[in-house]
């Protein structure tokens, strides 16, 4: 993004990020599912609330991108418009109402790659398969390729933990986290699981009851944000010289026979359907 918009301007990027909610009273909270209790952000980001209520007097949902931009959707006739609200250095605590003793750090510190994630699992959602990384549009389901290179240590760790591909999240403070079924160090994870805050343990239980038997792990931190994504390929796009050369080379090999492995043509969790490893309502 070349220019920074002003509060109230149309958001020039895509709608993704850490999910928060607000109301006219100025509260800001995170919620695991509708109907579950709220975890309030403390201290309250008053500037964010003021900017949001100036444009949505009843408050509503916002997203915080991996570049700290706060964005929201406002009604525009029969449609919705994505607008920029402001920037937010998200930090502090997530606190159950009137139960500060069970508060959770929003931004955990002192973690090593492979550690259990001791906070809520949220952030901008991306997917990968082998060396390809993309953001999937929730309405069109089209894959938008990520142009920013992930650090080799991040990508290789994701590939090792999820060899068939899947999804990961990027927090507003640039940490990369993912859900795994088979942690690399079960004994360590089991010990860390017992040490998790009570709130996080209960969130894990709630999600296991909904069929997601995976644990959140910390992978590492990004140096370059935001992750730039491009438009997906169109069937009417012109082929590049490299693509034409590759197509010509491939066509020259036609007629050679070899056994086809059916697994080469299967549809896995990194396909066009929402990845099973990270449901959309997380």
Image (cartoon, rainbow, N blue to C red):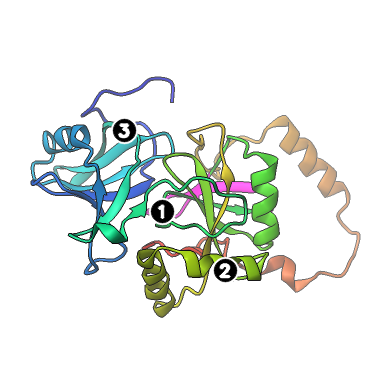
The 10 Å Cα crowd at callout 3, few under 14, some 14 to 19, many 20 or more, is many
Q: Is residue 139 magenta?
A: yes
- Out of 9 and 69, give the one closest to the viewer: 69
Q: Nearer the viewer, mark 3 or mark 1?
A: 1
Vertical placement of residue 55 versus 134, above or below: above
Q: Disc 1 designates what residue? A: 122
Q: Quadrant of residue 55?
A: top left
Labels 2 and 3: the sequence-earlier one? 3
From the image, which quarter does the N terminus lie in?
top left
Q: CA distance from mark 2 to mark 1?
A: 23 Å
Q: Kindly identify the residue that appears in the image at 41 percent across and 69 percent down.
A: 201
* Mark found first going from the N terminus, 3 or 1: 3
Q: Quadrant of the C terminus?
A: bottom left
The x and y percentages for residue 280 are: 40, 61
For marks 3 and 1, give the CA distance.
21 Å
Query: Counting residues from the N terminus, which is met first, the one under dot 2 or under dot 1?
Result: 1
In the image, taking residue 187 as reference, residue 256 lies left or right, namely right
Q: Picture coordinates of residue 17 (x, y %)? A: 38, 45
Q: Residues within 10 Å of mark 2 (few under 14, many from 20)?
A: few
From the image, tell me which residue sits under label 2.
191
Q: Residue at 89% across / 59% down in the picture?
A: 255
**Range drawn in magenta:** 130-144
- Element marked by disc 3: loop
Q: Position of residue 210 (x, y in %)?
A: 39, 77
Q: In this view of the protein, can residue 276 be seen by the observer?
A: no
The crowd level at tag 1 (other Cα within 10 Å; few <14, some 14-19, many 20+) is many
């Amino acid at each position: 993004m070349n220019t920074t918009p002003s509060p109230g301007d149309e958001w020039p990027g895509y709608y993704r990020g850490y999910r928060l909610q607000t109301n006219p009273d100025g509260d800001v909270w995170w919620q695991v599912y509708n109907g579950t209790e709220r975890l309030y952000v403390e201290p309250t980001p008053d500037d964010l609330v003021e900017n949001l209520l100036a444009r949505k007097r009843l408050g509503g949902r916002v997203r915080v991108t991996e570049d700290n931009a706060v964005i929201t959707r406002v009604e525009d006739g029969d449609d919705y418009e994505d607008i920029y609200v402001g920037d937010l250095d998200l930090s502090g605590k997530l606190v159950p109402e009137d139960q500060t003793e069970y508060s959770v750090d929003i931004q955990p510190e002192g973690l090593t790659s492979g550690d259990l994630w001791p906070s809520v699992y949220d952030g901008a959602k991306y997917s990968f398969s082998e060396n390809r990384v993309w953001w999937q549009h929730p309405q069109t389901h089209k894959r938008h390729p990520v142009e920013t290179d992930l650090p080799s240590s991040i990508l290789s760790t994701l590939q090792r933990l999820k060899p068939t591909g899947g999804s990961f999240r990027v927090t507003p403070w640039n940490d990369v986290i993912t859900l795994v079924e088979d942690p690399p160090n079960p004994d360590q994870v089991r010990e860390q699981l017992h040490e998790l805050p009570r709130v996080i343990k209960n969130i894990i239980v709630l999600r296991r009851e909904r069929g997601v038997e995976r644990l959140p792990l910390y992978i590492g931190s990004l140096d370059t944000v935001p992750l730039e994504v491009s438009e997906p390929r169109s069937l009417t796009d012109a082929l590049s010289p490299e693509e034409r050369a590759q197509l010509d080379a491939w066509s020259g090999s036609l007629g050679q026979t070899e056994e086809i492995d059916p697994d080469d043509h299967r549809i896995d969790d990194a396909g066009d359907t929402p990845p099973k490893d990270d449901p959309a309502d997380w």
